[in-house]
Image (cartoon, helix red, strand yellow):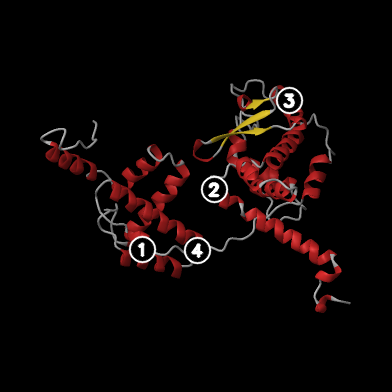
Amino acid sequence: MDLTPISAFTYPYATLYNSTIDILYRSRPMIEEFLRYMRLELNRSRLTAEAYGRDLHEFAAFIGTDDLDPSVPDTKMIRAWIASLADAGNAPVSLRRKTQSLRAFLRWAMKRGIRTDNPAAEVTLAKVPRPLPDFVKSDEMEYLLDNRGTPTESYSYARRHLVLNLLYTLGLRQAELIALTDADVSISSLEIKVTGKRSKQRVLPLPPQLADEIEVWRKIRDSRLPELPAPRPLITGRDGPISKTALYNLVHDALAGASATRHSPHTLRHSFATAMLNGGADLDAVREMLGHASIATTQIYTHLSFKELLGNYRNSHPRAKGKHEKK
């Protein structure tokens, strides 16, 4: 049934018709309708929608309801909820997201004509300290990628080496790597198509050495798993694409002993960005490679590079040391 409102200028019974739509529409669970809107109209990911849903149900429970009527919340009520969460020890990043979940929900309610204001917009977002991203130093990564202590014909070794190479050389997200298939890789044109957040695609250059490694790996993979259906996942697990857990464990074990505090796939994405900027790459080029929507997200790596530069300067130049450091 099409429940699209129609204009009173188009049909004489539009007022009655639209009122009927509103009754039918609001008889459905409102949180459920909002999440449908997020997934179908805003094209948000399933995980994002689920996180917003949990926040909204939590707020509904706080005010004593099963569902959430958009006409009910006010600024005082929302502030009381956020304060209770802060008192319970929720981190600023969690408080910030929960406020944003309510903002989005009430903004949707305004768009639907259910209310005319957004009281959540009056609630100040919790300030989140932004730590500098952790990364593995370039010389450590070069050692890891060049130290071929295990025969390249080994399935497990070849997979591990290619995973490290793809994450560090191209700056891929974990989910982007898992989603890669053979169809995304063009050896002839030395390009690789990556599907990022919100299904946005970007095409990245494929270094010849990495392209050669992919060809060698695919022969090893196909010999080990000849019955994989097409399009074949580039990095395989037991029954298809490698799982997030298996990928994390693979990278975590491979980076054991590295100077980075965290040994995760995302650490290698940070390492890629840092290596690019330290090597003189343009900030906007790094943004394009990483698939960031805003250059502001990429700029954090400039602070990271400056911090490393400052450390090297203070340790190397005699005039950079304070009096208390002189021997």
From the viewer's perspective, is the residue at label 1 or at label 3 nearer?
Answer: 1
- Position in image of residue 38 (x %, y %): 39, 43
Image quadrant where residue 290 sits? top right
For mark 3, give the secondary structure. helix
Location of residue 6 in the rendering, given as x and y in whole percent from the top left corner: 20, 36
Residue sitting at the far right: 327
Query: Label 1 to label 4, Cα distance in Å?
Result: 17 Å
Mark yes or no: residue 261 visible: no
The residue at 68%/47% (across/down) is 273
| Quadrant occupied by the C terminus | bottom right
Earlier in the chain: of badge 2 and badge 1, it is 1
Distance from disc 4 to disc 3, alpha carbons, whole Å, reads 46 Å
Real-space Cα separation, disc 2 to disc 1, in angstroms: 25 Å
The label shown at residue 122 is 1
Q: Are marks 1 and 3 in contact (CB under 8 Å)?
A: no
> Dot 1: within a 10 Å radius of its alpha carbon, few (fewer than 14), some, or many (20 or more) residues?
few
Query: Which label belongs to residue 153?
Result: none
- Please say if the residues under marks 2 and 1 sit with CB atoms less than 8 Å apart: no
Q: Residues within 10 Å of mark 3 (few under 14, many from 20)?
A: few
Could you tell me which residue is drawn at 24 percent across and 35 percent down? 4
What residue does disc 4 label?
A: 92
- Of mark 4 and mark 2, the one earlier in the sequence is 4
Residue beneath label 2, please?
294
